[in-house]
Amino acid sequence: MDSAPSCRELLAASTALTDVDRDRMLPVHDGAISTSSDCASALKDSEQIWMQLASAASTIANGQAVPVDQLFALRESFGVFTMSDASSSDRKTMLASVDAYLGENLTRQGRWEALAEAITAWRSNVVSRLVDDVANAYTALTPEDRSLASQEQKVLMTAGQSALAEQQTSDRRLTDVVAASRRLSAEPGAAALTSANKALGALLPLDHARADAAELEAISAIEAAMATAKFQRLSLAAGVFRHARNRTTAGELSDASSELSEEEHRKVPTEIAAAISLAVEAQLELVQSLARERRVADAIRSVDAAESSSSGLASAYGEVVAAVEELTSFDEVESSAALRAAVTRSDRVRRLLSQSDERIRGVMRLAEQAASYGQSVPIAIGQAFQAARSSLTNLDLERLSEDQRQLLDSVCGISGPLAPGVLAPADRCVNLTQRSQPWVLKPSAPLP
């Protein structure tokens, strides 16, 4: 039972046997009869396979799709026996068309599988060259692949389109960097350096991961040129700061130092190390200057609040004066409108404090004179003391020391029956923290 044609011959011979022939058969001939029965079954199965293949070939010829897995299983069922029956031109043509269809679809399936595998790998590390594998697998799809795509395959196509777009934009950025590096090498200068820095700054981590040897070399060349320019700016700013230490020069030096990356800090030339140390000093002075400026601003707000409420004036006035006095030439007061206004405000406060000092000195002098008379205070002194004390403002009262308060209270609070020249009792005094009735001198006879 080597082939279908042999089986047919055996089956034909077996069918032609007569009863006489069968009676004369020897035991050795029984095997042939059994084989002929097997041939009949094999030929039936083979014909069934050929009928299925014919149906598939007809479907394909009509432009309709045949499930690839089913067609592949059918084609796998073709053994040597079935293939031995493919001698006719019709069957050969049918086999060729089915094999061509199967081969194309298996290749198409392979392209989709390749795209799916590339996308899975890319999603595990999106910042890598794996984006190129996805883009390349996507571009390998044929127009027919795309037109026949299933819903799941359309999702793969969307991811492939995204990868292709990223690849193309990354290529453009890398191309720009190479071009900028070449211009910088051919015509060194500020314009070329600015252009190169812009191209370098536009690069994304993906671009660095995808860069080839030439692109990496261009990146390194621009980085080296940028580092040299930064070191030069830092050195120049340090020289200016040494000559004139102020907020402007300190800021410029601090900015120049801050421009350096960690890698550039590690590669700082020996001659630039001193400039780095000076930049640290400048940054510290800037911090201290900003602290002084904040103290002034806070003091001004406190003065505004105190003047609005007429309380806490002494403390607020003292703080604004102290804060302004703390300012140094480093702070560049003249270049700051806020600081200039604070200095003007401080000058006004100083005048107010000076006037307060005069009033306090005057009233304390009269209080000491009144106290020296005991309980017989000349009316002129008493009236002068009353007037001076009545003229004290809230600012003056807040600035009185405890001793001064006690002295004023002792003079005001002399008790006992009224007698010539005796001050009014305590309930007629002007309290230091809350005004009540004004002082009244009521001598029973003219004072001497």
Image (cartoon, rainbow, N blue to C red):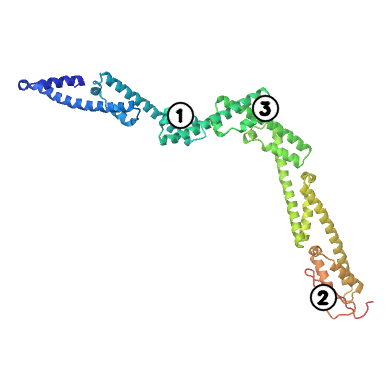
Task: Provide the residue designation for mark 1.
Answer: 137
Residue 34 occupies quadrant: top left
Marks 3 & 1, CB-CB < 8 Å contact: no
Task: Provide the residue designation for mark 2.
Answer: 428
238 lies left or right of 134: right
298 lies left or right of 107: right
Q: Residue at x 87, y 61 (%)?
A: 358
Q: Residue at x 78, y 53 (%)?
A: 322
Residue 174 visible in the picture: yes
SS class, disc 3: helix
Q: CA distance from mark 1 to mark 2?
A: 103 Å
159 lies left or right of 384: left
Which amino acid, mark 2?
Answer: Arg
For this orientation, the residue located farthest to the right is: 448
Disc 2 residue crowd, few under 14, some 14–19, many 20+, Cα 10 Å: some
Which amino acid, mark 1?
Answer: Ala
| Residue 366 in the image: above or below residue 234 | below
Residue 278 visible in the picture: no
Q: CA distance from mark 2 to mark 3?
A: 87 Å
- Image quadrant for the N terminus? top left
For this orientation, the residue located farthest to the front is: 62
